[in-house]
Image (tube, rainbow, N blue to C red):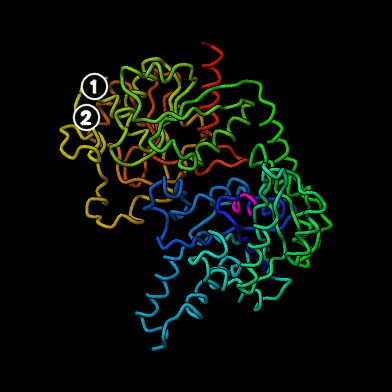
Amino acid sequence: MPETKYIFVTGGVTSSLGKGIISASLANLLQARGLKTTIQKFDPYINIDPGTLNPYEHGECFVTDDGAETDLDLGHYERFLNVRTSQANNVTTGRIYQSVIQKERRGEFLGKTVQVIPHITNEIKERMQLLGSTGDYDIVITEIGGTVGDIESLPYIEAVRQLRWELGKESCIVIHLTLVPYLSAAAELKTKPTQHSVKTLMESGINADILVCRTEHELSEDIRNKLALFCNVKREAVIQSIDAKTIYDVPLLMLEEGLDKVVLNLLALPDNLEPDLTSWKSFLTRLKNPKQHIRIGLVGKYVELQDSYKSILEAFIHSGAANEVKVEVVSIHSEHLTPENCSQHLEGLHGLLVAPGFGSRGIEGKISAIQYVRENNIPFFGICLGMQMAVIEFSRNVLGLKTANSIEMDSNTPHPVISLMDEQKEVENKGGTMRLGAWNCSLSANSKAHKIYGAKTISERHRHRFELNNDYVQQLDSHGLKATGINPETGLAEIIEIESHPWFIGVQYHPEYKSTVLAPHPLFSDFVQACSTYAKNI
């Protein structure tokens, strides 16, 4: 069995430079050359996972098929590679320390003093090689969260240093992503931040093999030569990563820079096959040459931070390209909406998506928005909490149950149309205890969902505690809101539709997690198509 090669991606100077996008782009190019490639993310925060983090803290929480609550970068990995990730693809400091402490409690260290070196670093190295040890991958790319010099990242950097020594230079390389800022007062690019960042990495015992330089302006040959000289890398290993119009341009930009070829040469792998990017280029052509422009409202409570709904925004890009439509997403804060001003805020929209979320803040605004689009036959898509709010709105304004609510918002409501799942009633710990991961759903024949999916049974990812109360399903059905998707294990509703409406669907699961560049999610694609039709007819 061929040995697995390892690539580590570190960052310097500042966070949010795009380590995840560079990692995903490189993986995309290697995959296009026929190499089986995966990516994993090591996060230095002490939370066990990001499941309990407020979206304002860390953006959205991405969920995998096996129920892992992970960093949003795993969404990029899946969207770029069209390959599913798992629990093994995201590791946090909290999970590392939890595992080591559990081993200590079981007596596995035979009375030894447990220390960062070797016990914590050994645990990190074991996790770093876990995916590679399966034999399923030729290359494993590992993104190290944070920046070099951060106190939280030191054990990870030390583990990488040890692995490089143990595996050898042709089996383990380091790519360092850094910033080359442009100072407008001096009208020039500055290399000093990159030099200091590389020096900090070297002080930890690691010499970067490749420099990827984020920049707003083209790097001159002089700057590239200077960086190569001062940072101990070859000239061809100084890679420019200039700002792009879309993240999906980055693989092609990295191809132009020769990043994949440099990597293959360093890892002693053949580079005679050119990457097949035909489908990727076709997607970009459609993305950049839309035949129509539509505006879709995104109603949420975290709209100030775009990363809070990252997968939804990317799913609109994929489905827009599939329909040759430019989707302009208009963010609308749910707290700003009232029955009186809905028409003003929603004017000019061709569709509305009500986003997931937790807690009572802003839900009345979501309900008002849903009533407006339902009554005005504007395409509507509700995800998770968005579906639940659609049920509440319909119950209040069509069934006449004015006090209908979710027990998440009002535990004493006389009409709990949304209730807590039975298995959640005894749950005390919040972390990792929701319904998570992929669950099956059976679709009603002749339903819109059945037509869209083209299947009787589907599998989608979940992240929630509350569900549509079955006590109200028949009453809702008799008035036109039908449960057209049912979880065969629990008997609970997963999809709702209003048959008399042009396009009104709510889903309890998160379809956005499964949308990729090469396989846009069918619900998003059909919703965008419905919005496009609505725009043409108004």
Q: Residue at 60% of width from left, 21% of height from top? A: 293
Residue 404: assigned label: 2
Residue 399: assigned label: 1
Please tell me how crowded label 1 is: few (under 14), some (14-19), or many (20+) other residues with Cα within 10 Å.
some
- Quadrant position of residue 333: top left
Residue 270, position as x, y percentages in the image: 81, 62
Q: Is residue 141 left or right of 432 when viewed as pictured?
A: right
Residue 223, position as x, y percentages in the image: 78, 54
Q: CA distance from mark 2 to mark 1?
A: 10 Å
Residue 447 visible in this rendered orientation of the protein:
no
Q: Is residue 450 left or right of 9 when viewed as pictured?
A: left
SS under mark 2: loop
Residue 140, position as x, y percentages in the image: 63, 62
- In the rendered image, the quadrant that contains the N terminus is bottom right
- State the residue in front, 461 or 358: 358
Is 281 magenta? The answer is no
Q: Residue at 39% of width from left, 21% of height from top? A: 499
Q: Is residue 125 left or right of 238 when viewed as pictured?
A: left
Q: Are marks 2 and 1 in contact (CB under 8 Å)?
A: yes
- State the residue in front, 445 or 284: 284
- Quadrant position of residue 508: top left
Q: Is residue 44 left or right of 207 when viewed as pictured?
A: left
